[in-house]
Image (spheres, rainbow, N blue to C red):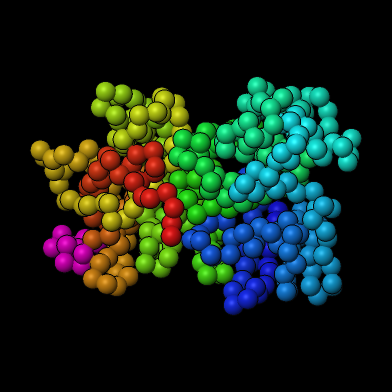
Amino acid sequence: MLSVDIHHMQGAFNLNAAFECGAGVTALFGPSGAGKSSVVNAIAGLIRPRAGRVVFDGETLFDSARGLHVRAGRRRFGYVFQEARLFPHLTVRQNLLYSHWFDRTLYSASDFSHVVELLGIGELLLRRPAQLSGGEKQRAAIGRALLAKPRLLLLDEPLASLDAARKQEILRYLRRLRDETRIPMIYVSHAVDEVLQLADQVVLLAAGDVVASGSVEDVMGRPDLRPGAGLFEGGAVIETQVTGVHRGDGLIMLGFDGGTLTAGNTSACVGDRMRVRIRAREVSIALEPPQQISIQNILRGRIVSVDAPGGGSVIVVIAVGSATLRARVTQRAARQLALAPGVEVYALIKALTLDQRVDGMPLNIQ
């Protein structure tokens, strides 16, 4: 368990971050300048906050009231930066074993072989960083961090400098790392698709403050979060599994206990698990199943609540199986359809808003 409650000032920027997280992957998520890197640097011990506490697994690492600040090197946390920061004069193998030179108890041949296989870097061991692609450098940097036997792995926007193809390559390895190791991770990002693919929990920051924290489904589905606030638009997050692939049409079928979704995708395979995010404004509502319509996804559900956040719109929360959808419609439409809790409706969603980029949103939130 990691507990963070820190206050820090850097120039005119004021950071106030308090949250707790457990095992698995916790994403520090938010727009550029939100304070994500400052938080992860405070966790790592690279900066000393003005005030507060940082506690990991019962051990106090920072406590301003007691004048306690455990040095970064003694915290036994692994850190992967946005740039790989490999030693240019060393081979990949030598970079991987860097921590072993200082503490020989950290290394075993089986550990080394496992990390090399896990990250698919066996063919890179004799190369130097200048001979590697950006994705290969990041895999080597992750391997170096793992072989230091960290209690916690910190990743500060490790995909930010990579192109789309390399991002997907590293994400595949990070998912495998998440599933095959028990090392808790703090993952810093402002990319929606990265968070949805990797994270179990999300801490959402904006302008130095924590504005939400909790499960991916809860935080990423909040209807009160909109791009105008410098964050992202809320909606729904649904856990699905690929049940069919139609390569010719560029479509896949995603099953969940509320039915089946059709989505645009050309690379998924049957059996793959996928989180789907559906923005509230992408969902339309009908009282009867429509006929002769191009929309591929028509899901039957029951209205749970109808809330009016203002601005002439309402948020309609719809239960579809155990999943919850949200639809943003005008107040006029809500009146015309007499939308109210308990009413059975049909949720209409375009297939092409559910592609591998999650919901068609730009990857980066600015």
The residue lying toward the viewer, choosing from 350 and 47, is: 47
Query: Which image quarter: residue 299?
Result: top left
Query: Which image quarter: residue 7?
Result: bottom right
Residue 85 percent coordinates (x, y):
68, 45
Query: Which residue is located at x 75 percent, y 49 percent?
Result: 77
| Number of numbered labels in the structure image | 0
Instruction: Indicate left or right for 16 with 263 as reference.
Output: right
- Split into 4 quadrants, where in the image is the C terminus? bottom left
The residue lying toward the viewer, choosing from 308 and 226, is: 226
Residue 84 percent coordinates (x, y):
65, 43
| Residue 344 in view, yes or no | no
Query: Which residue is located at x 84 percent, y 72 percent?
Result: 67
Q: Which residues are magenta?
A: 330-340
Q: Is 316 contained in the magenta span?
A: no
Residue 192 to residue 63: above or below? above
Residue 347 to residue 11: above or below? above
Query: Which residue is located at x 31 percent, y 24 percent?
Result: 247
Residue 360 percent coordinates (x, y):
34, 46
The residue lying toward the viewer, choosing from 136 and 40, is: 136
Instruction: Indicate left or right for 218 with 258 as reference.
Output: right
Q: Residue furthest left?
A: 292
Instruction: Indicate left or right for 122 with 36 as reference.
Output: right
| Residue 283 in view, yes or no | yes
Residue 103 to residue 345: above or below? above
The residue lying toward the viewer, choosing from 257 and 56, is: 56
Instruction: Indicate left or right for 211 with 100 as reference.
Output: left
Query: Which residue is located at x 35 percent, y 46 percent?
Result: 359
Q: Residue furthest bottom?
A: 12
Residue 13 percent coordinates (x, y):
59, 74
